[in-house]
Every structure is written in C-alpha cells, then in structure tokens.
Amino acid sequence: MNDQSDRDDRDGQNQPGPAEGRGPAHGRAGAEARGVRLVAVLLGLTVVSGLIDAVSYLGLGHVFTANMTGNVVVLGFAAAGAPGFSVPHTLTSLVSFLVGAVAGGRIAVRMGTGSRRTWARVTLAAEALLVGVSAVVAFAVPHATVTAYTLIALTALAMGLRNATVRKLGVPDLTTTVLTMTLTGLASDSRAGGGSGHHSPRRSASVVAMLAGAFLGAWLTLHHGLGIPLLIAAVAAGVFAVTASGHE
C-alpha cells in the first residue's frame, strides 16, 4: 500500500500542472497575436497595390505590375498594335511577377508550417526592400532608358512574392490586388442579391482601399514623378513588416 502511494506521489509530481502544460503553446499563441491583425495589414497592402499600379500604368507605359488580369488584357492590346502599349514592358511585368510568385511559393513551403507572423513579416520585408530599391532607381536615374524596365521588374517581382504569400495565408475576401471576385461577392452575397451581406464590410473596405491607393498614386505620379509614390509604398510595406501579427 505504501509503495503504491509513493508511486502515485511521484507520478503526481512529474505531471505538468495546468499552467505548465499550456505554457509553451500559450506563449506561442500570444506571440502570434502581437502586432497589427492581418485583416488590417492586407487592407493597407491593398492601398499599396493601388499606388504601385498607378505608378506603373501612368508612368511606365500603360503596364500593370500588381494586377495581372489587366496585364494580360494589356498584352493583347499591345500585340494587336494598339497605340500606347508595349509588348516588351508587359512581358517584363508578367515574367517578373511569375518569378516572384515562384519565390513566394518556395517561402511558403519552408515557412508556412511555422509562425504565420514570422512568415508574413519576412515576405513583407522583402517587398519593402524591392520597392525601396525601385524608389531609389526612380530618384537616381528617372529618365534613363533602362529605368522603366528596372521599375517594372522590381515592383512586379515584389507583387508576385506578396500575392503568393497572401494566397497561402488564406484570409477570406482580401487578395490585395484583384477586385473582380470581391465586387462579385459584394453584389451577389448582399441582401439585394438574396444573401446575408455578412462579409460586406471587409469587401467594401477592400474596394475603398484600392480606390484610395490608386487616387493617391495617380496624383503623386502626375504631379511629383515616380519616386515619391514608390517610396511611400516601400515605407508602408516596411511598417507592416515590423508590425504584422499572425492572427486574422
């Protein structure tokens, strides 16, 4: 009887208590939650997309570097000989975007099973670096022939990397670059369309964010050149890189 009691006492001493058993997992969850929630980060990045597409379309020869749906259409226009469009510029954007998406996929394979917070911050830091370099180029050699191709390649690479990451993160209704399905869902799932309108605030915010970014980017590009909107986009991505949390 005493031997059994001794064993029970030893077993009880070796079992983790409630706080001890939950400690590491609770600590990881707390670390993931620290920072700006992903919904707010992705809305901010949607503004950045509007900025970047305004720069690329208005300042780099009618080419998109964030919105590849529009870019495929633009490539068709350019191939048909429509004035104001460039096949080389558009192909540079498409290829660079795909390279960025491949890199984003590889990062997701390596980091996607770990901390979402770390994963998001690493890719946003890479985006900030790429867009930051493009801003430096725009300020340093604004009129050089190679500048347009450099800015297209760097910003499209950054957008491909980000899009792959956002897709893998899987936050509903926030792609940060494409609004076609967002607008479709906003209309078809609204109360007027027979739905509940449950996700309308998030979808509406996404549309407003893109519009605001495009307006700001267009105004800055038309009145102050390419460097300032690119610098703002780089700083915004950098801020999100150091503040993003891992929670939606």
Image: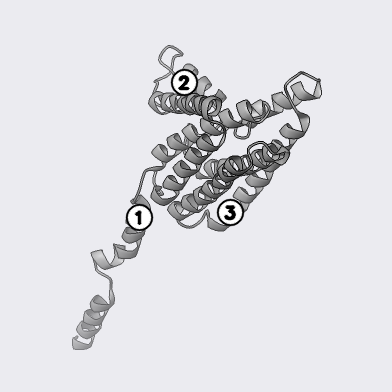
Can see residue 170? no
Quadrant for residue 134, please give it: top right
Q: Residues within 10 Å of mark 3 (few under 14, many from 20)?
A: some
Looking at numbered disc 2 in the image, what kind of residue is underneath it?
A: Leu
Q: Is residue 216 left or right of residue 27?
A: right
- Measured in 3D between alpha carbons, the distance from the residue under mark 1 to the one under mark 3, in whole angstroms, is 22 Å
**Residue 126, placed above or below residue 98:** below
Front one among 120 and 151: 151
Q: Is residue 104 left or right of residue 83?
A: left
Mark 1 secondary-structure assignment: helix
Q: Residues within 10 Å of mark 1 (few under 14, many from 20)?
A: some
Rendering coords of residue 186 (x, y %) = 47, 21
**Residue 111, placed above or below residue 226:** below
| Quadrant into which the C terminus falls | top left
Can see residue 63? yes
Looking at numbered disc 1 in the image, what kind of residue is underneath it?
A: Ala
Residue at 58% in and 47% down: 133
Q: Which residue is mark 3?
A: 107
In front: mark 3 or mark 2? 3
Whichever of labels 1 and 2 marks the residue nearer the N terminus, that label is 1
Rendering coords of residue 53 (x, y %) = 58, 30
Looking at numbered disc 3 in the image, what kind of residue is underneath it?
A: Ile
Mark 3 secondary-structure assignment: helix
Q: Which residue is mark 1?
A: 29
| Number of the label disc, if any, that sits on residue 186 | 2
Quadrant for residue 202, please give it: top left
| Quadrant into which the N terminus falls | bottom left
